[in-house]
Image: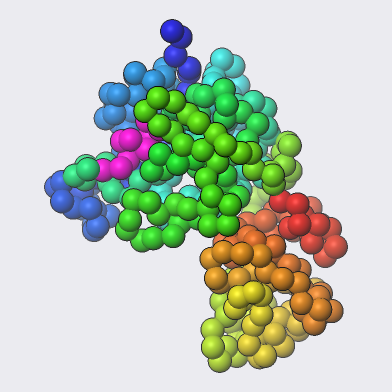
Amino acid sequence: MTKPKVAVIGTGGTIASQGVGPLDVADYASSGLPLLDAEGLVAGVPALKLVADVVPVLFSAIPSTAVGWSDWRALVAKVAEVKAAHPDLAGIVVTHGTATLEETAYLLSLTLPDDGVPVVLTGAQRPFTGLSTDGHMNLVAAVRAAGAPASRGRGVLVVLNDEIHAAREVTKTSTGRLQTFRSPDLGVLGHVDADGVTYWRRPERYPPGRLFDIRGIEAPPRVDVAYSVAGGDGVATRAFLAAGAQGIVAAGFAPGFTSPAEREALAEAAAGGCVVVMSSRAGSGRTFPARRYQAQGIVNADNLNPQKARVLLMLALTVTRDRAEIAGLFATN
């Protein structure tokens, strides 16, 4: 039986990290040992040869806390380069640190063309050298999912802990547990089990093609996140404006409110031309559009968490500043 051809692009993160010993599964970033590149990862998991013809692709080896716009632009370009170099490719896996994996996955879902080549992100909670590391099996599962014909047409996917998630829906929910990636509102799309890749549903919200083209944009519009707290006084929002924020995402109290002083500061921001989006710090559920916030020009984030709302707002501001258009993007993506 012919095995699918799957590329593995390594970007670093815990899955590529090396500790000083098998029990170094928490402070491995202090080990001083280099992160493995894609070639090292693939060579270190011989079982990959059983499920696919794997092509390792060198890209970067950095912690995901260091990932930003320039890395996203380069990754979008690298995916296109790999597809052009390997027209027979069944799928692509991107290994990534878990800290910002969900943001990278969501951005890729909005900036990559849906051309029939699945893109799957994976990572690990324990380093490559750790006892019972989850990274080895996560990599195998991601390669299997990327190579499965059933994965086509579902947008960018995230695979960890044998679960397949939609890029828009998934978030990291635990600092250390292996089952950290969850889709709180809607659940998994499917599973990677011993006998195959199984799906039960398709994500409703993902663009049918490339929605935003960031390849020629050197720097994104500045978008900050203002986190709501009891007694919040709006100082953070005004500081973001002073720093040049073109957009602000409010991580509001559930189901989408802030303290009175914060609301006043956000209203000032919106009146001054900054695009303000109301999300929630709750971790699950839609933010409900309140009339008083809408009257102030504040856009509803729907059920996007603050970090993903920031990604969409950054991208939206590259093409429009019309709040009605931006609200439409949040309602459909």
Left or right of 304: which side holds 162? left
Left or right placement of residue 169 versus residue 276 in this view: left
Which x, y percent locates residue 4?
48, 17
Number of marks in the image?
A: 0
Residue 30 position within the rendered picture, expressed as x and y whole percent measured from the top left: 23, 57
Of residues 28 and 121, the one drawn nearer to the viewer in this rendering: 121
Q: Give the percent coordinates (x, y) of residue 88.
A: 56, 15
Residue found at x 34% / y 24% = 48
Residue 136: x and y, percent?
31, 36
Q: Which quarter of the figure has residue 199?
A: top right
In depth, the one of 278 and 29 nearer the eye is 278
Q: Which residues are magenta?
A: 133-141
Q: Is residue 251 above or below residue 171?
A: below
Examine the image and state in which quarter residue 143 appears: top left
Q: Is residue 138 magenta?
A: yes
> Magenta stretch containing residue 290, yes or no?
no
Instruction: State the predominant SS element of the stretch in magenta.
Output: helix
Residue at (53, 66) in percent of width and height: 283
State the scheme by which the image is colored.
rainbow
Image quadrant assignment for residue 39: top left
Q: Is residue 17 left or right of residue 224?
A: left
Q: Farthest residue in the front direction?
A: 200
Whether residue 82 can be seen here: no
